Image: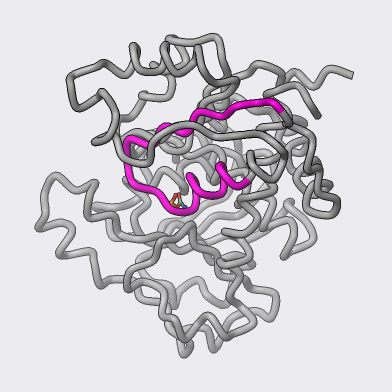
Amino acid sequence: MPTGFTGRDIISIKELNKKEILLVLNQAEKLKRAPEPELLKGCVMGSCFFEPSTRTRLSFETAMQRLGGSVIGFADPGVSSATKGETLYDSIRIIGQYADVITMRHPLDGAARRAAEATEKPIINGGDGANQHPTQTLLDLFTIRECQKRLTNLSIAMVGDLKYGRTVHSLAQALIHFQPTFYFVAPDFLQMPDHLLEQLREAGIKYSLKKTIEEVVNKVDILYLTRIQKERFSDISEYEKAKNLYVLDVPLLAKAKPNLRVLHPLPRVNELSPAVDSTPYAYYFEQAANGLYVRQALLGLVLGKL
Ligand code: CP
């Protein structure tokens, strides 16, 4: 039966409905249990990273290779013809003639959408500016379901850079399908953008704005930490004010519910103490590992093989 994914761009999590999200998660679960080393044999993925990445790029490339496909591309635009002034449109139009699917990351909001106009091949957005990171959201949902055994009616705190954090923007939008209660922990100048809070209100989702982790740690099932992203601040004094505000260490978890799990899209800087790694609450390394299966599922679906 057609899934509706074949040939499709994955640009924004808002374009996937609940049924489609669950289909991706279920396919990822199957691939985690039973690898498919021949599924994408003969297929080529273009991997175009105009901005640094460790997890997203390497898990996509591993996903493709472990499904039997191959990878072309660049991890640094400095080695591409972007340095000679080639437009994103032209680059993607050309790469689309070599590859069957293109994964990309770009520092500008809307770049993935622009790229999708340049080629008929599916574009998968691996992060565009402060806008969207839909594949991170799918792996976050997969991980939440894995560690909590459900997605519905969870209490979820998002902490840190909620203004510029594309992972929290995409995740909050996706969780609208699953009746969460949100706690957004950030200083006023890094709080969730108004347009996202408006979406939550329209969907009848409960949320409250908080200033400290202490206020929420005993209430939540998921504590989703984020890095204060220095590279997104135009006013560096705001970054200096924010950079040490939230640091999760073991004593802060003393009042946590036993089922609480700490997630973080990573990389971390100082907001998540390595001492937390050896507590039963830490689940961020499993989260990063799950990116492989979720990206395998997406590649298989958009290439019409699942
Ligand atoms: N979570 C995430 O996007 O990590 P990378 O920046 O390393 O890809």
Image-based side of 12 in relation to 79, left or right: right
- The image's colour scheme reads one colour
Q: How many circles with numbers are drawn on the protein?
A: 0
In the image, is residue 213 above or below residue 264? below
Verify whether residue 54 appears in magenta.
yes
Image-based side of 304 in relation to 267, left or right: right
Image-based side of 162 in relation to 32, left or right: left
Quarter the N terminus occupies = top right
Residue 131 visible in rendering: no
Near-viewer residue (39 or 106): 39
Residue drawn at the location 50% of the way across and 12% of the way down: 97
Segment tinted magenta in the rendering: 42-62
Residue farthest along the right direction in this orientation: 1
The location of residue 158, given as percent across then percent down, is: 47, 58
The location of residue 278, given as percent across then percent down, is: 57, 85
Residue drawn at the location 74% of the way across and 60% of the way down: 146
Residue 161 visible in rendering: yes
Near-viewer residue (274 or 70): 70
Near-viewer residue (178 or 30): 30
Quarter the C terminus occupies = top right
The location of residue 92, given as percent across then percent down, is: 41, 17
Verify whether residue 160 appears in magenta.
no
Task: Please identify the quarter of the rendering in which residue 181 is found.
Answer: bottom right
In the image, is residue 19 above or below residue 63? above
In the image, is residue 218 above or below residue 203? below
Task: Please identify the quarter of the rendering in which residue 22 is found.
Answer: top right
The location of residue 102, given as percent across then percent down, is: 52, 26
In the image, is residue 302 above or below residue 235? above
Near-viewer residue (156 or 52): 52
